[in-house]
Protein backbone atom coordinates (compact mmCIF):
# COMPACT_ATOMS: atom_id res chain seq x y z
CA UNK A 1 0.00 0.00 0.00
CA UNK A 2 1.02 3.61 -0.61
CA UNK A 3 4.43 2.72 -2.02
CA UNK A 4 4.38 5.77 -4.26
CA UNK A 5 4.65 7.98 -1.16
CA UNK A 6 8.15 6.72 -0.31
CA UNK A 7 11.10 8.10 -2.31
CA UNK A 8 13.36 5.32 -0.97
CA UNK A 9 11.22 2.78 -2.79
CA UNK A 10 12.13 4.33 -6.13
CA UNK A 11 15.32 2.34 -5.72
CA UNK A 12 15.29 -1.34 -6.43
CA UNK A 13 15.21 -2.46 -2.80
CA UNK A 14 13.08 -4.66 -0.64
CA UNK A 15 13.06 -3.15 2.83
CA UNK A 16 12.25 -5.63 5.59
CA UNK A 17 13.93 -3.91 8.56
CA UNK A 18 11.05 -1.77 9.76
CA UNK A 19 11.52 -2.68 13.41
CA UNK A 20 14.88 -0.87 13.22
CA UNK A 21 13.49 2.16 11.45
CA UNK A 22 10.77 2.82 8.93
CA UNK A 23 11.09 4.62 5.62
CA UNK A 24 9.91 8.23 5.43
CA UNK A 25 7.10 9.40 3.18
CA UNK A 26 7.69 12.41 0.97
CA UNK A 27 5.31 14.58 3.00
CA UNK A 28 7.56 14.22 6.07
CA UNK A 29 10.71 15.02 4.12
CA UNK A 30 8.99 17.98 2.42
CA UNK A 31 7.75 19.33 5.72
CA UNK A 32 11.28 19.37 7.13
CA UNK A 33 12.72 20.90 3.97
CA UNK A 34 10.01 23.53 4.13
CA UNK A 35 11.01 24.41 7.69
CA UNK A 36 14.70 24.66 6.85
CA UNK A 37 14.00 26.55 3.61
CA UNK A 38 11.28 28.94 4.66
CA UNK A 39 11.00 29.53 8.39
CA UNK A 40 14.07 27.96 9.97
CA UNK A 41 14.12 29.96 13.20
CA UNK A 42 14.27 28.71 16.77
CA UNK A 43 11.20 27.81 18.78
CA UNK A 44 9.80 29.80 21.71
CA UNK A 45 11.06 33.16 20.43
CA UNK A 46 7.81 34.60 19.17
CA UNK A 47 9.18 38.10 18.66
CA UNK A 48 9.11 37.87 14.90
CA UNK A 49 6.79 36.25 12.37
CA UNK A 50 8.78 33.24 11.28
CA UNK A 51 9.58 32.31 14.86
CA UNK A 52 5.91 32.55 15.69
CA UNK A 53 5.23 30.11 12.88
CA UNK A 54 7.87 27.73 14.31
CA UNK A 55 6.11 27.77 17.66
CA UNK A 56 2.78 27.08 16.05
CA UNK A 57 4.09 24.15 14.03
CA UNK A 58 6.10 22.73 16.93
CA UNK A 59 3.17 22.92 19.34
CA UNK A 60 0.85 21.61 16.67
CA UNK A 61 2.82 18.37 16.67
CA UNK A 62 2.32 18.15 20.42
CA UNK A 63 -1.39 18.44 19.84
CA UNK A 64 -1.22 15.74 17.16
CA UNK A 65 0.73 13.41 19.47
CA UNK A 66 -1.73 14.02 22.27
CA UNK A 67 -4.64 12.98 20.07
CA UNK A 68 -2.70 10.12 18.49
CA UNK A 69 -2.16 8.40 21.83
CA UNK A 70 -5.33 9.88 23.36
CA UNK A 71 -3.64 11.71 26.23
CA UNK A 72 -5.74 14.03 28.38
CA UNK A 73 -3.45 17.03 28.53
CA UNK A 74 -0.93 18.68 26.25
CA UNK A 75 1.46 18.98 29.21
CA UNK A 76 1.69 15.21 29.29
CA UNK A 77 3.59 15.16 25.99
CA UNK A 78 7.33 15.80 26.26
CA UNK A 79 9.55 15.71 23.19
CA UNK A 80 12.84 13.83 23.59
CA UNK A 81 15.57 12.66 21.26
CA UNK A 82 13.96 9.25 21.13
CA UNK A 83 12.64 6.31 23.05
CA UNK A 84 15.97 5.65 24.76
CA UNK A 85 16.32 9.15 26.15
CA UNK A 86 12.72 9.08 27.36
CA UNK A 87 13.27 5.79 29.21
CA UNK A 88 16.43 7.11 30.83
CA UNK A 89 14.61 10.30 31.84
CA UNK A 90 11.95 8.34 33.69
CA UNK A 91 14.29 5.85 35.33
CA UNK A 92 16.73 8.52 36.46
CA UNK A 93 14.47 11.55 36.86
CA UNK A 94 11.57 9.80 38.54
CA UNK A 95 12.25 6.29 39.82
CA UNK A 96 15.74 7.03 41.09
CA UNK A 97 14.18 9.45 43.59
CA UNK A 98 11.30 7.19 44.45
CA UNK A 99 12.72 3.69 44.80
CA UNK A 100 14.57 2.47 47.86
CA UNK A 101 17.13 -0.28 48.25
CA UNK A 102 15.42 -3.66 47.98
CA UNK A 103 12.50 -2.32 45.92
CA UNK A 104 11.86 -4.46 42.90
CA UNK A 105 11.46 -3.67 39.22
CA UNK A 106 10.06 -6.36 36.94
CA UNK A 107 11.08 -6.61 33.31
CA UNK A 108 11.42 -9.64 31.00
CA UNK A 109 14.31 -11.28 29.20
CA UNK A 110 12.94 -10.19 25.85
CA UNK A 111 13.22 -6.47 26.53
CA UNK A 112 15.31 -4.18 24.35
CA UNK A 113 18.59 -2.91 25.83
CA UNK A 114 17.04 0.52 26.44
CA UNK A 115 14.55 -0.98 28.87
CA UNK A 116 17.22 -3.07 30.60
CA UNK A 117 20.41 -1.07 30.99
CA UNK A 118 18.94 2.01 32.74
CA UNK A 119 17.47 -0.37 35.35
CA UNK A 120 20.75 -2.26 35.74
CA UNK A 121 22.47 1.06 36.30
CA UNK A 122 19.93 2.12 38.93
CA UNK A 123 20.28 -1.27 40.64
CA UNK A 124 24.00 -0.68 40.96
CA UNK A 125 23.51 2.83 42.25
CA UNK A 126 20.49 2.48 44.55
CA UNK A 127 20.42 -1.21 45.40
CA UNK A 128 17.06 -1.90 43.77
CA UNK A 129 16.37 -5.41 42.49
CA UNK A 130 15.76 -6.11 38.80
CA UNK A 131 13.82 -9.34 38.34
CA UNK A 132 12.23 -11.07 35.38
CA UNK A 133 8.64 -12.00 34.67
CA UNK A 134 8.92 -15.54 33.26
CA UNK A 135 8.03 -15.94 29.58
CA UNK A 136 5.74 -18.78 28.53
CA UNK A 137 6.48 -21.44 25.89
CA UNK A 138 5.95 -18.92 23.10
CA UNK A 139 8.17 -16.38 24.92
CA UNK A 140 5.05 -14.34 25.71
CA UNK A 141 4.18 -12.41 28.84
CA UNK A 142 0.91 -13.56 30.36
CA UNK A 143 -1.12 -11.93 33.10
CA UNK A 144 -0.82 -15.16 35.09
CA UNK A 145 2.97 -14.97 34.99
CA UNK A 146 2.85 -11.33 36.05
CA UNK A 147 0.67 -12.33 38.99
CA UNK A 148 3.13 -15.03 39.95
CA UNK A 149 6.15 -12.77 39.59
CA UNK A 150 5.12 -9.83 41.73
CA UNK A 151 6.12 -9.66 45.36
CA UNK A 152 5.36 -7.13 48.10
CA UNK A 153 8.59 -5.42 47.04
CA UNK A 154 7.51 -4.89 43.42
CA UNK A 155 7.20 -1.19 42.68
CA UNK A 156 7.53 -1.01 38.89
CA UNK A 157 6.71 -3.16 35.88
CA UNK A 158 8.57 -1.96 32.80
CA UNK A 159 7.68 -3.66 29.53
CA UNK A 160 7.64 -3.26 25.79
CA UNK A 161 4.14 -3.22 24.31
CA UNK A 162 5.44 -5.22 21.35
CA UNK A 163 8.88 -6.82 21.63
CA UNK A 164 11.38 -6.37 18.86
CA UNK A 165 12.43 -10.02 18.41
CA UNK A 166 9.38 -12.07 19.36
CA UNK A 167 6.85 -9.47 18.24
CA UNK A 168 4.23 -10.43 20.78
CA UNK A 169 1.61 -7.84 21.69
CA UNK A 170 1.46 -7.89 25.47
CA UNK A 171 -1.91 -7.82 27.27
CA UNK A 172 -1.01 -4.46 28.76
CA UNK A 173 -4.45 -3.26 29.77
CA UNK A 174 -4.93 -6.30 32.01
CA UNK A 175 -1.37 -6.12 33.35
CA UNK A 176 -1.67 -2.40 34.14
CA UNK A 177 -5.02 -2.89 35.84
CA UNK A 178 -3.61 -5.66 38.00
CA UNK A 179 -0.43 -3.68 38.73
CA UNK A 180 -2.36 -0.63 39.88
CA UNK A 181 -4.42 -2.75 42.24
CA UNK A 182 -1.10 -3.54 43.89
CA UNK A 183 0.25 0.02 43.78
CA UNK A 184 2.79 -0.84 41.10
CA UNK A 185 3.78 1.71 38.47
CA UNK A 186 3.82 0.63 34.84
CA UNK A 187 6.23 2.00 32.27
CA UNK A 188 5.48 1.02 28.69
CA UNK A 189 7.97 1.07 25.83
CA UNK A 190 5.78 1.56 22.79
CA UNK A 191 8.58 1.87 20.22
CA UNK A 192 7.49 -1.19 18.26
CA UNK A 193 3.77 -0.74 18.69
CA UNK A 194 2.88 2.89 18.23
CA UNK A 195 3.06 2.94 14.42
CA UNK A 196 1.39 -0.44 14.10
CA UNK A 197 -1.51 -0.71 16.53
CA UNK A 198 -3.67 1.93 18.21
CA UNK A 199 -2.42 3.41 21.47
CA UNK A 200 -4.82 4.83 24.02
CA UNK A 201 -3.00 5.89 27.15
CA UNK A 202 -6.24 6.65 29.00
CA UNK A 203 -7.82 3.33 28.17
CA UNK A 204 -4.59 1.56 29.13
CA UNK A 205 -4.29 3.79 32.20
CA UNK A 206 -0.53 3.53 31.79
CA UNK A 207 1.70 5.70 34.00
CA UNK A 208 4.49 6.37 31.50
CA UNK A 209 4.75 5.57 27.82
CA UNK A 210 7.66 6.24 25.48
CA UNK A 211 8.27 5.90 21.75
CA UNK A 212 10.35 7.11 18.81
CA UNK A 213 9.13 8.99 15.76
CA UNK A 214 11.45 7.21 13.33
CA UNK A 215 9.73 3.87 13.78
CA UNK A 216 6.45 5.37 12.60
CA UNK A 217 7.43 7.16 9.38
CA UNK A 218 8.81 10.17 11.22
CA UNK A 219 12.33 11.61 11.36
CA UNK A 220 15.18 10.22 13.45
CA UNK A 221 16.15 12.06 16.61
CA UNK A 222 12.64 12.65 17.93
CA UNK A 223 10.82 10.74 20.61
CA UNK A 224 8.02 11.18 23.06
CA UNK A 225 7.79 10.82 26.78
CA UNK A 226 4.20 10.57 27.92
CA UNK A 227 3.45 10.58 31.63
CA UNK A 228 0.31 11.09 33.65
CA UNK A 229 0.33 14.76 34.54
CA UNK A 230 0.54 14.28 38.29
CA UNK A 231 3.53 11.96 37.87
CA UNK A 232 5.30 14.00 35.24
CA UNK A 233 5.09 17.01 37.55
CA UNK A 234 7.55 15.29 39.85
CA UNK A 235 10.03 14.14 37.19
CA UNK A 236 13.30 15.90 37.80
CA UNK A 237 14.91 17.24 34.61
CA UNK A 238 18.18 15.47 33.74
CA UNK A 239 19.19 18.34 31.52
CA UNK A 240 19.30 21.91 32.75
CA UNK A 241 19.79 24.96 30.62
CA UNK A 242 18.06 27.18 28.14
CA UNK A 243 14.39 27.07 27.40
CA UNK A 244 13.40 25.19 30.51
CA UNK A 245 14.04 27.82 33.19
CA UNK A 246 11.72 30.62 34.15
CA UNK A 247 14.43 32.70 35.78
CA UNK A 248 17.57 32.46 37.88
CA UNK A 249 19.72 34.92 39.76
CA UNK A 250 23.27 35.20 41.03
CA UNK A 251 22.20 33.77 44.39
CA UNK A 252 21.59 30.52 42.52
CA UNK A 253 17.85 30.70 42.89
CA UNK A 254 16.40 28.89 39.89
CA UNK A 255 12.78 28.81 38.85
CA UNK A 256 11.79 26.26 36.26
CA UNK A 257 9.05 26.51 33.69
CA UNK A 258 5.95 24.36 33.79
CA UNK A 259 5.46 21.12 31.95
CA UNK A 260 6.27 20.14 29.29
CA UNK A 261 8.94 22.77 28.59
CA UNK A 262 10.66 22.08 31.91
CA UNK A 263 11.71 18.70 30.51
CA UNK A 264 12.84 20.01 27.12
CA UNK A 265 16.09 21.83 27.87
CA UNK A 266 18.10 23.34 25.05
CA UNK A 267 17.07 24.04 21.49
CA UNK A 268 14.86 21.11 20.57
CA UNK A 269 14.96 19.12 17.34
CA UNK A 270 12.59 21.60 15.75
CA UNK A 271 12.74 20.25 12.20
CA UNK A 272 12.31 16.72 13.50
CA UNK A 273 9.33 17.55 15.68
CA UNK A 274 7.65 19.46 12.84
CA UNK A 275 8.33 16.58 10.44
CA UNK A 276 6.95 14.18 13.01
CA UNK A 277 3.65 16.04 12.95
CA UNK A 278 3.42 15.36 9.27
CA UNK A 279 4.08 11.65 9.89
CA UNK A 280 1.20 11.47 12.34
CA UNK A 281 -1.16 13.14 9.90
CA UNK A 282 0.01 10.70 7.25
CA UNK A 283 -0.59 7.63 9.42
CA UNK A 284 -3.97 8.98 10.52
CA UNK A 285 -4.95 9.31 6.90
CA UNK A 286 -4.18 5.65 6.20
CA UNK A 287 -5.61 4.55 9.52
CA UNK A 288 -3.86 2.40 12.10
CA UNK A 289 -6.54 -0.27 11.90
CA UNK A 290 -5.97 -0.57 8.17
CA UNK A 291 -2.24 -0.83 8.80
CA UNK A 292 -2.66 -3.47 11.51
CA UNK A 293 -5.02 -5.57 9.41
CA UNK A 294 -2.77 -5.48 6.36
CA UNK A 295 0.32 -6.33 8.39
CA UNK A 296 -1.46 -9.31 9.86
CA UNK A 297 -2.41 -10.58 6.43
CA UNK A 298 1.15 -10.12 5.18
CA UNK A 299 2.55 -11.92 8.21
CA UNK A 300 0.23 -14.89 7.76
CA UNK A 301 1.25 -15.08 4.11
CA UNK A 302 4.95 -14.90 5.01
CA UNK A 303 4.70 -17.50 7.78
CA UNK A 304 2.80 -19.95 5.59
CA UNK A 305 5.46 -19.68 2.92
CA UNK A 306 8.37 -19.94 5.36
CA UNK A 307 6.81 -23.00 7.00
CA UNK A 308 6.99 -24.79 3.68
CA UNK A 309 10.78 -24.45 3.64
CA UNK A 310 12.23 -27.42 5.54
CA UNK A 311 15.62 -25.89 6.37
CA UNK A 312 14.18 -22.93 8.30
CA UNK A 313 13.67 -22.71 12.06
CA UNK A 314 11.09 -20.07 12.91
CA UNK A 315 11.47 -18.67 16.42
CA UNK A 316 8.18 -16.84 16.79
CA UNK A 317 5.69 -18.82 14.79
CA UNK A 318 2.72 -17.28 16.51
CA UNK A 319 2.73 -13.60 17.09
CA UNK A 320 0.38 -10.83 16.12
CA UNK A 321 2.80 -8.23 14.85
CA UNK A 322 4.73 -8.05 11.60
CA UNK A 323 7.92 -9.37 13.15
CA UNK A 324 9.23 -12.80 12.13
CA UNK A 325 12.50 -14.16 13.54
CA UNK A 326 14.10 -17.29 12.13
CA UNK A 327 17.28 -19.04 11.11
CA UNK A 328 18.44 -21.06 8.14
CA UNK A 329 19.56 -24.39 9.52
CA UNK A 330 23.32 -24.54 9.87
CA UNK A 331 24.03 -21.12 8.37
CA UNK A 332 24.96 -18.12 10.47
CA UNK A 333 22.28 -15.45 10.25
CA UNK A 334 24.67 -12.77 9.09
CA UNK A 335 25.76 -14.87 6.11
CA UNK A 336 22.14 -15.21 5.05
CA UNK A 337 21.68 -11.45 5.43
CA UNK A 338 24.73 -10.86 3.19
CA UNK A 339 23.27 -13.24 0.64
CA UNK A 340 19.90 -11.49 0.62
CA UNK A 341 21.68 -8.15 0.35
CA UNK A 342 23.11 -9.29 -2.97
CA UNK A 343 19.51 -9.25 -4.18
CA UNK A 344 18.83 -5.87 -2.55
CA UNK A 345 16.76 -7.37 0.23
CA UNK A 346 17.38 -5.63 3.54
CA UNK A 347 16.92 -7.85 6.60
CA UNK A 348 18.43 -7.67 10.04
CA UNK A 349 20.77 -10.31 11.46
CA UNK A 350 21.90 -10.46 15.04
CA UNK A 351 20.60 -10.44 18.57
CA UNK A 352 18.51 -7.31 17.94
CA UNK A 353 19.62 -5.56 21.14
CA UNK A 354 17.89 -8.24 23.23
CA UNK A 355 21.02 -9.89 24.49
CA UNK A 356 19.52 -11.61 27.49
CA UNK A 357 16.88 -13.31 25.39
CA UNK A 358 19.31 -15.80 23.91
CA UNK A 359 19.46 -18.05 26.97
CA UNK A 360 15.70 -18.20 27.02
CA UNK A 361 15.30 -19.05 23.36
CA UNK A 362 18.50 -21.04 23.05
CA UNK A 363 19.44 -19.14 19.91
CA UNK A 364 21.93 -16.31 20.12
CA UNK A 365 21.37 -14.75 16.73
CA UNK A 366 18.64 -14.75 14.16
CA UNK A 367 17.36 -13.15 11.01
CA UNK A 368 14.50 -10.78 11.48
CA UNK A 369 11.91 -9.70 8.95
CA UNK A 370 9.81 -6.79 10.16
CA UNK A 371 6.97 -5.70 7.93
CA UNK A 372 5.17 -2.44 7.37
CA UNK A 373 2.28 -1.36 5.24
CA UNK A 374 4.38 -0.59 2.16
CA UNK A 375 5.68 -4.17 1.95
CA UNK A 376 4.00 -6.40 -0.60
CA UNK A 377 3.15 -10.03 -1.29
CA UNK A 378 5.50 -9.90 -4.28
CA UNK A 379 8.39 -8.88 -2.02
CA UNK A 380 7.66 -11.81 0.23
CA UNK A 381 7.59 -14.11 -2.80
CA UNK A 382 11.03 -12.86 -3.83
CA UNK A 383 12.41 -13.43 -0.35
CA UNK A 384 10.89 -16.89 -0.05
CA UNK A 385 12.27 -17.96 -3.42
CA UNK A 386 15.79 -16.94 -2.37
CA UNK A 387 15.51 -18.69 0.99
CA UNK A 388 14.08 -21.91 -0.39
CA UNK A 389 17.31 -22.94 -2.12
CA UNK A 390 19.87 -23.74 0.58
CA UNK A 391 22.58 -24.72 -1.90
CA UNK A 392 22.22 -21.34 -3.57
CA UNK A 393 22.61 -19.61 -0.19
CA UNK A 394 25.76 -21.57 0.56
CA UNK A 395 27.10 -20.87 -2.89
CA UNK A 396 26.40 -17.17 -2.97
CA UNK A 397 26.69 -16.02 0.63
CA UNK A 398 30.46 -15.54 0.55
CA UNK B 1 42.77 -18.62 -7.56
CA UNK B 2 39.74 -20.34 -9.03
CA UNK B 3 36.56 -18.97 -7.48
CA UNK B 4 35.03 -22.41 -6.98
CA UNK B 5 38.13 -23.71 -5.22
CA UNK B 6 38.18 -20.60 -3.05
CA UNK B 7 34.54 -21.07 -2.11
CA UNK B 8 35.02 -24.76 -1.40
CA UNK B 9 37.93 -24.16 0.96
CA UNK B 10 36.08 -21.43 2.85
CA UNK B 11 32.89 -23.46 3.13
CA UNK B 12 34.78 -26.54 4.25
CA UNK B 13 36.48 -24.63 7.06
CA UNK B 14 33.13 -23.03 7.94
CA UNK B 15 31.10 -26.23 8.06
CA UNK B 16 33.89 -28.41 9.51
CA UNK B 17 36.08 -25.98 11.39
CA UNK B 18 39.33 -27.38 12.74
CA UNK B 19 40.30 -26.99 16.40
CA UNK B 20 36.86 -25.80 17.44
CA UNK B 21 36.58 -27.07 21.00
CA UNK B 22 36.41 -25.77 24.54
CA UNK B 23 39.49 -25.79 26.71
CA UNK B 24 39.61 -25.84 30.48
CA UNK B 25 43.37 -26.45 30.69
CA UNK B 26 44.68 -23.50 32.67
CA UNK B 27 47.96 -23.36 30.81
CA UNK B 28 46.09 -21.90 27.80
CA UNK B 29 45.77 -18.14 27.50
CA UNK B 30 42.30 -16.98 26.56
CA UNK B 31 41.03 -13.95 24.66
CA UNK B 32 37.68 -12.94 23.27
CA UNK B 33 37.51 -11.22 19.93
CA UNK B 34 34.43 -9.61 18.42
CA UNK B 35 33.42 -7.11 15.81
CA UNK B 36 31.67 -4.00 17.01
CA UNK B 37 29.54 -3.61 13.93
CA UNK B 38 28.37 -7.18 13.71
CA UNK B 39 27.63 -10.23 15.78
CA UNK B 40 30.77 -12.34 15.34
CA UNK B 41 32.03 -13.48 18.69
CA UNK B 42 34.97 -15.84 19.10
CA UNK B 43 36.99 -17.07 22.06
CA UNK B 44 40.58 -18.09 21.29
CA UNK B 45 42.69 -20.35 23.52
CA UNK B 46 46.40 -20.63 22.92
CA UNK B 47 49.15 -22.70 24.50
CA UNK B 48 52.60 -21.18 24.11
CA UNK B 49 55.69 -22.90 25.49
CA UNK B 50 59.26 -21.70 24.98
CA UNK B 51 58.08 -19.06 22.51
CA UNK B 52 56.51 -21.70 20.29
CA UNK B 53 52.76 -21.99 19.67
CA UNK B 54 51.99 -25.54 20.76
CA UNK B 55 48.23 -25.45 20.33
CA UNK B 56 45.26 -23.17 19.58
CA UNK B 57 41.56 -23.87 19.99
CA UNK B 58 38.50 -21.70 19.47
CA UNK B 59 34.85 -21.44 20.41
CA UNK B 60 32.02 -19.12 19.52
CA UNK B 61 29.52 -18.11 16.93
CA UNK B 62 30.53 -16.22 13.85
CA UNK B 63 29.86 -15.88 10.14
CA UNK B 64 31.32 -18.07 7.42
CA UNK B 65 34.22 -15.74 6.74
CA UNK B 66 35.19 -15.26 10.41
CA UNK B 67 34.80 -18.93 11.28
CA UNK B 68 36.75 -20.22 8.27
CA UNK B 69 39.40 -17.56 8.72
CA UNK B 70 39.84 -18.64 12.34
CA UNK B 71 40.10 -22.29 11.38
CA UNK B 72 42.67 -21.54 8.67
CA UNK B 73 44.67 -19.21 10.89
CA UNK B 74 44.90 -21.80 13.64
CA UNK B 75 45.94 -24.55 11.25
CA UNK B 76 48.73 -22.34 9.93
CA UNK B 77 49.96 -21.00 13.28
CA UNK B 78 50.28 -24.19 15.32
CA UNK B 79 53.96 -25.11 15.56
CA UNK B 80 55.20 -21.65 14.64
CA UNK B 81 57.58 -19.64 16.79
CA UNK B 82 56.26 -16.29 17.98
CA UNK B 83 58.44 -14.51 15.44
CA UNK B 84 57.08 -16.66 12.61
CA UNK B 85 53.55 -16.18 13.90
CA UNK B 86 53.87 -12.40 13.86
CA UNK B 87 55.28 -12.55 10.36
CA UNK B 88 52.34 -14.67 9.19
CA UNK B 89 49.86 -12.27 10.76
CA UNK B 90 51.58 -9.25 9.17
CA UNK B 91 51.39 -10.83 5.71
CA UNK B 92 47.74 -11.72 6.20
CA UNK B 93 46.86 -8.18 7.26
CA UNK B 94 48.81 -6.79 4.32
CA UNK B 95 46.84 -8.98 1.91
CA UNK B 96 43.47 -7.92 3.30
CA UNK B 97 44.56 -4.29 3.14
CA UNK B 98 45.74 -4.60 -0.48
CA UNK B 99 49.46 -4.30 0.32
CA UNK B 100 52.35 -6.53 -0.80
CA UNK B 101 52.42 -10.00 0.77
CA UNK B 102 54.00 -13.40 0.33
CA UNK B 103 51.58 -16.07 -0.88
CA UNK B 104 53.89 -18.89 0.17
CA UNK B 105 53.81 -17.83 3.81
CA UNK B 106 50.03 -17.55 3.90
CA UNK B 107 49.25 -20.98 2.39
CA UNK B 108 45.45 -21.54 2.49
CA UNK B 109 45.11 -18.06 3.99
CA UNK B 110 45.20 -16.67 0.43
CA UNK B 111 41.57 -17.67 -0.05
CA UNK B 112 40.83 -14.20 1.32
CA UNK B 113 42.99 -12.43 -1.25
CA UNK B 114 39.93 -10.83 -2.85
CA UNK B 115 38.07 -10.03 0.37
CA UNK B 116 39.05 -6.37 0.03
CA UNK B 117 36.35 -6.13 -2.63
CA UNK B 118 33.74 -6.51 0.10
CA UNK B 119 34.62 -3.81 2.53
CA UNK B 120 32.15 -4.95 5.17
CA UNK B 121 33.71 -8.43 5.25
CA UNK B 122 37.33 -7.39 5.71
CA UNK B 123 36.78 -7.16 9.45
CA UNK B 124 35.33 -10.68 9.40
CA UNK B 125 38.49 -12.14 7.87
CA UNK B 126 40.67 -10.15 10.26
CA UNK B 127 38.69 -11.03 13.38
CA UNK B 128 40.77 -14.01 14.59
CA UNK B 129 43.99 -12.08 13.93
CA UNK B 130 42.79 -9.29 16.18
CA UNK B 131 42.31 -11.88 18.91
CA UNK B 132 45.63 -13.58 18.21
CA UNK B 133 47.55 -10.31 18.49
CA UNK B 134 45.81 -9.70 21.82
CA UNK B 135 46.98 -13.11 23.02
CA UNK B 136 50.57 -12.56 21.88
CA UNK B 137 50.61 -9.29 23.78
CA UNK B 138 49.18 -11.03 26.82
CA UNK B 139 51.95 -13.64 26.61
CA UNK B 140 54.64 -10.96 26.36
CA UNK B 141 53.25 -9.17 29.40
CA UNK B 142 53.17 -12.37 31.43
CA UNK B 143 56.74 -13.18 30.44
CA UNK B 144 58.10 -9.85 31.64
Image: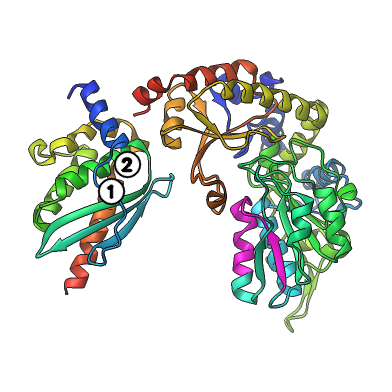
Question: How many marks on residues?
Answer: 2
Can residue B93 be spotted in the picture?
no
The residue under label 2 is B66
Seen at 10% across and 52% down, the residue is: B79
- Tell me the quarter of the image containing the N terminus of chain A: top right
Seen at 10% across and 63% down, the residue is: B51
The residue under label 1 is B128
Can residue A20 be spotted in the picture?
yes
- Density class for disc 1 (Cα within 10 Å; few <14, some 14-19, many ≥20) is many
Q: Magenta region: which residues?
A: A103-122
Direction from residue B119 to residue A122 in the image, left or right: right
Seen at 31% across and 41% down, the residue is: B67
The one of A359 and A373 positioned closer to us in this rendering: A359
* Place of residue B107 in the rendered image (x, y in percent of width and height, measured from the top left): 12, 37
- Classify residue A356 by image quadrant: bottom right
Residue A302's place in the image compared with A37, above or below, is above
Residue A271's place in the image compared with A290, above or below, is below
Tag 1 secondary structure:
helix
Residue A117 is covered by the magenta coloring: yes
* Place of residue A304 in the rendered image (x, y in percent of width and height, measured from the top left): 63, 22
The one of A140 and A254 positioned closer to us in this rendering: A140
* Place of residue B74 in the rendered image (x, y in percent of width and height, measured from the top left): 20, 47
The circle drawn on residue A65 is none
Q: Marks 2 and 1, Cα distance to the nearest angstrom?
A: 7 Å
Direction from residue A278 to residue A314 in the image, left or right: left
Asked if the residues shown at circle 2 and circle 1 are in contact, with their CB atoms under 8 angstroms apart, the answer is yes
Tag 2 secondary structure:
helix
For mark 2, name the chain: B
- Classify residue B93 by image quadrant: top left
Amino acid sequence: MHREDFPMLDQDIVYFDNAATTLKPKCVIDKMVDYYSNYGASAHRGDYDISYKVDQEYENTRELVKDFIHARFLEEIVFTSGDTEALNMIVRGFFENLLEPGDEVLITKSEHASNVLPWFSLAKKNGIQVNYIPLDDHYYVTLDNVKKAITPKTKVISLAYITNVIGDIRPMKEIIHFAHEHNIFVLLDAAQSVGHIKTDVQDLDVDFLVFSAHKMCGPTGVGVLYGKKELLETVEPLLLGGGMNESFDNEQAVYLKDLPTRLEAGTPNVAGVIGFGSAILYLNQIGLDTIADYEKELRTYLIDKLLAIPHLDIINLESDSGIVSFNVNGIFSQDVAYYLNKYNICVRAGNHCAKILKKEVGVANSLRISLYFYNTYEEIDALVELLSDKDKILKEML
Amino acid sequence: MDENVRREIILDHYQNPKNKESITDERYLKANTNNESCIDNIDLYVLIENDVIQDIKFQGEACAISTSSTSIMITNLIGKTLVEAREYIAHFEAMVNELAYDEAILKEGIVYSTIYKQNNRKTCALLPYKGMLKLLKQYDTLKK
